[in-house]
Image (cartoon, rainbow, N blue to C red):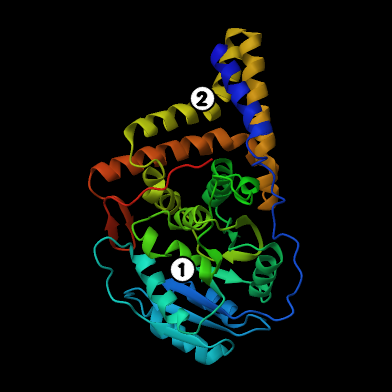
Amino acid sequence: MWTAAVSLAAWLWLLLFQGMFWRTDVRLPPRRDPGAWPSVCVVVPARDEAAVLPRSLPSLLAQDYPGRAEVFLVDDGSSDGTGALARELAGRCGGLPLTVDSPGEPPAGWTGKLWAVRHGVALARAREPEYLLLTDADIAHAPDSLRRLVAAARTGGFDVVSQMARLRVESLWERLVVPAFVYFFAQLYPFRRIARRGGRTAAAAGGCVLLRTDAAVRARIPDSIRHAVIDDVALARAVKGGGGHVWLGLAESVDSVRPYPRLHDLWRMVSRSAYAQLRHNPLVLLGTVAGLTLVYLVPPVALVAGLIAGDGATALLGGAAWLVMTGTYAPMLRYYRQPLWLAPALPFTAFLYLLMTVDSAVQHYRGRGAAWKGRTYSRPDAVPDES
């Protein structure tokens, strides 16, 4: 009974005092078109992305942007013809100018993605753009995406404007796992706190980051975060640590086209960086497992155990905690256009994430670290939790 009471208290605290993380109305802030549109360079790191590039790259090339803009796709040692396909798509689709280049293999101390970003940023800075748009190769943008991002940045005086791309939710496992991924991220990094000047909470979503060039220079992006596996949070933290103003919200016209049809695919996506988020600290891992158990698993267990044992107080406390949990998850399901009957299944999904986190630690101690697309980073820098 007392464990169920503590779980309910934790949920009431999360509901009322964790930056209203459960709300999904944090979208691009109010904006107005600038008198003169600044120049923008789009940097796209890409490694073995031929499967998704036909759906994403044309959307970038077709941006309806009134100012000067061009795209730099950095082929990070692909073996599937990503670079050649990008050139072919540019020739077929037209639109913004496209430069395709490759930096070669990353040196020691760099993750592959950030080494590619460094090369792309160096190429872009030769054009002296006021803004850089860092976007992944699996992200498709609506035609007015760049225009809206720049207008929001200029209107609000933001050094970083980032949108969390809407991930694909078509398979059963995607429906169970993907909305919860964004829900848990918002719980760790409440979007409203990120936008506060002088606040400690900082995060971005790596699929879509509009970055003011002079802020990147001040924060030494990407050199200062070259080890980071969770590079988007590290980027926002570096910019905010240098006095920059950061905004993060949910996307309306930015979508990921990468499928994760099987549980195995989603498991790899989460487990490759989960232990890095915990700073590779076994004590933090134990605390995380205990916290996930108390907050997400205790409520349904207490409800069922209380009903079976005839303990009305335990059942009532467990049921109330489960009800609050379900209510906070419902807005995210609505954002993803998913049926609300999935909301009570959140404890099951949380249990999967618990197992993924433990597996991430196991892989780390086996020397496999954060494995991604043929590369393994055995001891990547971690990004502290700043919630």
- Nearer to the camera, 10 or 154: 154
Q: Earlier in the sequence, mark 1 or mark 2?
A: 1
47 over 338 or under it: above or below:
below
Residue at point 58%, 63% (across, down): 159
Q: Is residue 385 above or below residue 251?
A: above
Residue 304, percent from left and from top: 58, 19
For discs 1 and 2, the disc positioned in front in the rendered view: 1
Residue 337 appears in the figure: no
* Amino acid under disc 2: Leu
Residue 227 visible from this viewpoint:
yes
Q: Residues within 10 Å of mark 1 (few under 14, many from 20)?
A: few
Along the viewing direction, whichever of 168 and 44 lies nearer the viewer: 44
Location of residue 313 in the rendering, given as x and y in whole percent from the top left corner:
65, 10
Tag 2, which secondary structure?
A: helix
Crowd class of label 2 (few under 14; some 14 to 19; many from 20; radius 10 Å)? some
- Do the residues under discs 1 and 2 have CB atoms within 8 angstroms? no
Left or right: where 167 falls relative to 287: right
Residue 333 percent across, percent down from the top left:
66, 47
Q: In the rendered structure, which amino acid carries the disc numbered 1?
A: Val
Screen quadrant of the N terminus: top right
Question: For the residue labelled by badge 1, is the local secondary structure a helix, a strand or a loop?
Answer: helix
Question: What's the distance in space between the residues labelled 1 and 2, CA to CA?
Answer: 43 Å
Tell me which residue sits at (62%, 8%) in the image.
311
11 over 178 or under it: above or below: above
The x, y position of residue 210, in whole percent, is 57, 67
Query: Residue at coordinates 67% horizontally, 80% vertically from top-left?
Result: 37
Q: Quadrant of residue 282?
A: top left
* Image quarter hosting the C terminus: top right
Q: Which mark is residue 217?
A: 1
> Farthest top residue?
310
Q: Residue at x 53, y 91 (%)?
A: 92
Residue corresponding to mark 2: 294
